[in-house]
Each structure stands twice: as structure tokens, then as C-alpha cells.
Image: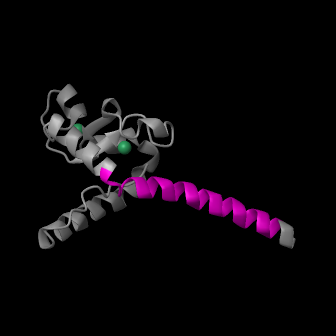
Amino acid sequence: MSVQQMVLESIGMLTLFGQTDKYVRFYHTKAWHDARQETLVRQHYLCQDCLREGKTTVANTVHHIIPLRDDWSKRLDQNNLEVICLEHHNQEHPEKASSNKKYYKREKQIKKRNDIFKFSSNKDDEKIF
Ligand SMILES: [Zn+2]
Ligand SMILES: [Zn+2]
């Protein structure tokens, strides 16, 4: 591989990281935290997919119906946000089914952390899809 190729390759990778970073950062903004909270309260912390199936399941994950990557402008749009349980979230993201196992673990860890550090909230730490 030539030096020129290597340089081009690293620029490509940086761009990729930059993009991912944008989505990661978004989940740490106050704007997202507020929008998410509004959705949870508006939908009473109930999985909307479960409701449609006639079940009531308490959930605290807020899902983008149109993913961030598909329409960045709808990231804070209440019409694009929905409370969803982990089981339904997996169905919405079948391509990520294996990595969701990690997500379950992480959720548990975050919950534990919240128990210890009651003053800091990590609830907006949603996994990016
Ligand atoms: Zn559900
Ligand atoms: Zn989602």
C-alpha cells in the first residue's frame, strides 16, 4: 500500500468516526434528554407496541421510528419518538439482535449505577442504532 493510499484510508476512517461520534454525542445532549422525557411522560412509560397488542408493559427506552441515520431532522420530533420495551426494540432492530444482548447487560449496569448515584442520570444513554 502506498503512503498516499494510507493517507486516503485514514481520512475515510476519520470521517466514519466523526459521523458515529455525532450520533453518540446527540444522546448526551440536554435537548435529547428533554425530548425523551417528554415522550416517556406523554406515553406514560408504556411500550406503544405492547399497547397495540393489548398489553401494558412499563418501559423506559425511547425509540426513533425513523432512525437518526435516515432522517437527522426528525431526531427531536415528538411524532418520531415512541416508548418501546426491550423486546419490541429488538424486533425493530433485527439486524442488531446479537449486539442487543450486550445492551441488556448494559441496561442492568446503568440501573445499578443509578441506584448508587441518585443525583446523576444516565438514562439518556440509549444505545445507538
Ligand atoms: Zn413492547
Ligand atoms: Zn430504536
Tell me if 92 is positioned left or right of 115 in this view.
right
The answer to whether residue 24 is above or below residue 68 is below
The answer to whether residue 93 is above or below residue 30 is above
Image position, residue 39 (x, y; %): 23, 39
- The front one of 126 and 87 is 126
Tell me if 121 is positioned left or right of 79 in this view.
left
Image position, residue 91 (x, y; %): 35, 40
Tell me if 1 is positioned left or right of 121 in this view.
right
In this view, the residue farthest toward the right is: 2
Secondary structure that dominates the magenta span: helix
Quadrant that contains the N terminus: bottom right
Image-quadrant location for residue 102: bottom left
Looking at the picture, the colour scheme in use is: one colour
Image position, residue 111 (x, y; %): 19, 63
Residue sitting at x 47%, y 45%: 95
Q: Quadrant of ligand 1?
A: top left
Query: Is residue 115 in the magenta section?
Result: no
Image-quadrant location for residue 15: bottom right
Image-quadrant location for residue 125: bottom left
Q: Tell me the magenta residue range.
A: 5-30
Whether residue 1 can be seen here:
no
